[in-house]
Amino acid sequence: MLTRRSLLATTAGTAAILGLGPLAAAPAFAKTPKNMAVMAKQIDDMVSLDPAESYEFTDNEVDSNCYSKLVVPDRADPSKIVGDLAQSWDVTPDGLTITFHLKSDVLFASGNAVTAEDAAYSLQRVIKLNKAPAFVIGQFGFTPANVDSLIKATDAHTLVVQLPALQATSFLLYCLSANVGGIVEKAVAEAHAMNGDFGNAWLKTNSAGSGAFVLVSWVASDHIILNVNPHFKPQPAMKRIAIRHVADPSAQLLLVQKGDVDIARDLTSDQLKSISGDKKLHLITANQAAQMYVAMNESVPQLAKPEVRQAIKWAIGYAAIAEHITPDTWNVSQSFLPKGLPGTLDETPFHKDTAKAKALMEKAGLADGFSVSMDYISHSPYSDIAQAIQADLGAIGIKITLVPGEEKQVITKTRQRAHQLALLEWFPDYFDPNSNAQAFCFNPDDSDASKVRVPAWRSHFVDKTLTADVLSASKETDTAKRIAIYADMQKSFWETAPFAFVLQKNDVATLRAGVNGLFLGALPDFTSYRGITKS
């Protein structure tokens, strides 16, 4: 709830970020400098800014503005890969070796040149650290024991990557374009290494990249400050980016209306509607691959029953949620592949059918229902959606206790497999269907010792056919055959999986008049600040 006290606290925090000191005379607002962009955003999901560990929405967005990668998806057409640090690359006829030729004029923020040795070190440390996103690179067969010999620099500008087994080249390139592929400066990371951590503890809250900006400060659930990388070409117009954690969208709206921030990132549908026609503000939008879904942990006996999982899918009022809670910001989406990725089935097989859902509950032997908890992220629009789902499932006898928490708390709990139901958000790790297919369908080892701890593992979803299909599709070089595999997987998933996909995000940013150039990407790490200008 927005109060005068909370608003003044938020304004004081923004003034402090701007270097204006404590708020001298509330309710005066700080005017942002012309060479600095100030953004209001919910950033309570952040865990680490080390590319080898970063795995959340805001982490990845910030990292993408501090680090460069070997290759990236083309902005105009993400289905194509273009060079970032790589000038070009060659693939041997057998498809097992890729040689990257790096640009010679790219500098880290330190002023040192980016070399192939930095690139090799960065990918090697991903495998050796083995943090959450390590599987993106490790799935190709790289291990701590072999990675030094398979990924190596042969000279200052040549990086050779040898695959232990054949995989589609496009699949590898998309994985290298993921946030985990960010190239860190070896000398800086090693200078801050402690107890063999490859500089991980330091890089959680610092940066050592060649991107447009340098991380100056991150205070959890408070703010992020980036300064321009003086060696980046061409130089961004904004010399500083300040991102203020403002959990309440109402506070974000008032701050951007008053000019205390330049950009608001999390306005609700009703708020966007309320500012229609306001000449002091304008909107930019982009379809994102982020999706919202309900995870059902099969360790809960009732949720282990297929009929109960199907009942939940048929009980949810998808259309009503999209129409009344998230118009213009989230749209109905029910496949584990978001619209825009190759192979997505643009179908919505489920709709609210309470009678059908009740019949499935009776078939499961649970006509009288049961009680269960649901974790959810405690800011808009999750709170309203969680309440809507609570009501929908209550109509079929499933009594939900809602458990709100900060995003990082909810994520941590599900990673520990400690949830029952959870309302979550997910985005692909890279722009290839394998990313989500693996996340939600692949679980070769359901034990606590598993090395692949993706959402399927977190909810104890084991389907041997889908697991095999993930591997088959990743190796299929015939595009049509590969797409056909994913189509069959999506149909099977709808019938068996303990996940109810509900919505897909349409990202909307609200900018002050005269503020332009923010690029919103299909994935968080596609979003770029370097083009922002102010007049």
Image (tube, grey):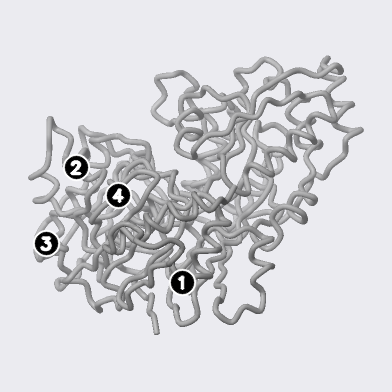
On the image, the x and y values in percent for residue 71 come to: 33, 63
Q: Quadrant of the C terminus?
A: bottom left
Q: Tag 2, which secondary structure?
A: helix
Q: Are the residues flagged by discs 1 and 4 in contact, CB closer than 8 Å?
A: no
Check disc 3 and report the residue beneath it: 110
Indicate the quadrant where residue 191 lies.
top left
Q: Tag 1, which secondary structure?
A: loop
Q: Tag 4, which secondary structure?
A: strand
Q: Residue at x 33, y 54 (%)?
A: 224
- Estimate the spatial distance between the alpha carbons at disc 4 and disc 2, rounded to whole Å: 12 Å
Check disc 1 and report the residue beneath it: 259
Classify residue 33 as left or right of residue 517.
Answer: left
Q: Are the residues flagged by discs 3 and 4 in contact, CB closer than 8 Å?
A: no
Callout 4 amino acid:
Trp
Q: Nearer the viewer, mark 2 or mark 1?
A: 1
Check disc 4 and report the residue beneath it: 218
Callout 1 amino acid:
Gly
Q: Are the residues flagged by discs 2 and 1 in contact, CB closer than 8 Å?
A: no
On the image, the x and y values in percent for residue 400 come to: 71, 26
Q: Which mark is residue 202?
A: 2
- Estimate the spatial distance between the alpha carbons at disc 1 and disc 4, rounded to whole Å: 23 Å
Q: Residue at x 66, y 50 (%)?
A: 503
On the image, the x and y values in percent for residue 331 come to: 69, 56
Q: Earlier in the sequence, mark 3 or mark 1?
A: 3
Q: Residue furthest bottom?
A: 535
Determine whether 528 is above or below 466 in the image: below
Indicate the quadrant where residue 195 lies.
top left
Q: Nearer the viewer, mark 3 or mark 1?
A: 1
